[in-house]
Each structure stands twice: as structure tokens, then as C-alpha cells.
Image (cartoon, grey):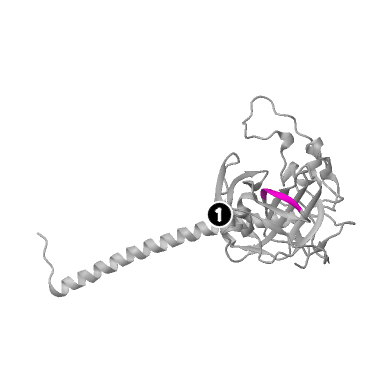
Amino acid sequence: MARRLKGLDQITAWFGGIAIATGIMTAVWYGAKYYASTKANEERSAIDAVLSDVRKSTANDSSTEHPPKAEIPEKPHGDVHPAAKSPLENYGYTGNVAPWYWANLNEKWKNCASKVNQSPIDLSGAKLDERLKTLKFFYQHGMTTIYFEHQTVKGKVERGSYVEWDGERFDLENVYFRTPSEHRVNSLPYELEAQLEHTAVDGRRLMVATLFTTGKSNDLIERVAKNIPPLPQDTREIDRANWIDIFPLEKTYWTYVGSSTTPPCSPDVRWIIFTQESFTNKSAIDQFVLRQKANARPVYTLGDRRLVRSNR
């Protein structure tokens, strides 16, 4: 029969029980902390590996000699998934579908081999143009459908938002995210570039871009980062998104005429890039980097084009 503890024995047993419980709780806490630290280190290592690849890929300049031409893949045979792209529509940023091969992947993409009037460029050395007017944004809240295609997070924007440039209306249609930025300043890329595609009634295109660096949070960018679809055929919806929320407060800008930075590398695209950087937190940028890796086209020389900046 068990003996009932009294007095000093009872107190000693009580403290002993506390010590054992404290030891167990401490062991559990350290175990959880070790697991979380291990997972964080693994994720950080993965991000660092991707960033290392990004730095290596952006070190390539489009003015260097291109690698040997890639063979155009054959057309697929038999049934294919409706979400799958034909090999002739596929392009990417590594291997034999990298930017220097684009012109050889599809006969309609021959313009991608041109080194004249192409985008992106380095934005350094722009001349001030007093005649440039303030951009007028008429953006509104609406639904944006997020999807993943060609190694790029994209957003299809609900119609209704537009910008006025030089007295003309350009409707906002799509948003593209690049890691690192395609446009550079003093030869250096930013961590992230958001490119907003606008189209006029006659089909002319105007791209408004903002360059991101790590800093204070941006709610809309974080919402997109958290809703990047895990599979190419998946989509996510961001409700009440107003894309003016990702722009810097100061709306001065660089502008030049270039091209689309993806096939078919169409010319005569007006680019407007804000001179003031935008901010978002590091975890949001990391999510884009982990999903997209490096999806920036190499920079091209300005040539005889005019690169100017506004003062308002």
C-alpha cells in the first residue's frame, strides 16, 4: 500500500515534480525551436541557391555572342492536356528555351534575335525632359486572376482601370512579375520588377513598371505572393485589387521606346518606369524568387534611342 507523504517529504516531492515537468517542457521547447530553425535554414539555403543562380544569369549581357542555335522542337503527337502549351509556344529562361534561343523556337519570334530597339535596358544617363507631363491614373478596385506561365507569375486584371499618356487612354490588362528586375540602374538589377501592360484602342502597348527593393510591407504584393498557384493549370483570385497601391508616392519616371520582353519581342512598345523605388517585405520577394527563379531577359544597348526622365 502506498505511503502518503507528509511535511518535508511532500514539499520535496512537489518541487521534484515541478523540476521534471519543467525539464520536459524545456526539452519540448528546444526540440520545436531546433525543428523550426532547421526548416528555416533549409528554406534560406534554397532561396540563397536561387539568388545565386539569379546573379549568374543576370551577369550575361545580350551584347555577348549567343550560344549555338537550338533546334526547333517537333509538334506534339496525340492528345495533350488542354492547359499544356505546344512546344512551338514554349519559352523560358534556362536551357535550350532561354532568351538567346527564342528566335529559333518559333518562326514568328524572329524579332527576338534583333539587338536594335529591344527591351530591357539600363536606365542610367537619362536626360531631363521638361515637356513630359504627369501620368494620369484612373485605376479602380477589381478582381485580378493570378496564374503561372512561362516561369512567370502573371495577373489578368478586370477591365475598367486605365492610364492617360500624352492625351490618350491605355487600358490596364495584365501584370507581370520579374525576378530580378529586367531594367537596371547603373548596371544593377533590383530584387523585383512589376510590369503593368496597357493597350490602346488601336493595339499600341504601354508598359508601366516599378522596381522593388526590400523594405516596408506592401499589402497587395504580399497577397499575390501568398496566392501564387502551386501548379501551372491552377488560378487564384485577388479581390478588390487596386494596382496603383504598388506604385511609389512620387510618380516621376523614365521613358523610352522599346519592345516586349517576351516572345514575339514586338517593337514600338512605350516603357514608363518610375524613378522612385517601391518597397515590399523580404518574405514576399522570396516567394517570387522561389517560384520563378530568374525570369529576366538580358539588357540591350540603348543605341540611338532617346531615354528621358520627367520632373513631375
Residue at 83% x, 64% y is 131
Q: Position of residue 166 (x, y in %)?
A: 79, 56
Work out which quarter of the rendered image holds the N terminus and state it. bottom left
Frontmost residue, 112 versus 221: 221
Decide whether residue 169 is among the magenta residues: yes
Work out which quarter of the rendered image holds the C terminus and state it. bottom right
Q: Position of residue 88 (x, y in %)?
A: 74, 34
Frontmost residue, 38 versus 199: 199
The residue carrying pointer 1 sits among few (fewer than 14), some (14 to 19) or many (20 or more) residues within 10 Å by Cα, namely some
Identify the image quadrant of residue 287.
bottom right
Residue that numbered label 1 is attached to: 223
Q: Residue furthest bottom?
A: 8
Residue at 66% x, 46% y is 151
Is 206 situated left or right of 9 in this image? Answer: right
Residue at 75% x, 30% y is 74
Q: Main secondary structure of the magenta part?
A: strand
Residue at 34% x, 63% y is 25
Identify the image quadrant of residue 5.
bottom left
Let me know if residue 112 appears in the view. Answer: yes
Q: Is residue 278 above or below residue 260?
A: below
Is 126 situated left or right of 95 in this image? Answer: right
Let me know if residue 45 appears in the view. Answer: no
Q: Position of residue 272 (x, y in %)?
A: 75, 57
- How many numbered circles are shown? 1
Q: Residue furthest front?
A: 167
Decide whether residue 148 is among the magenta residues: no
Which span is picked out in magenta? 168-175
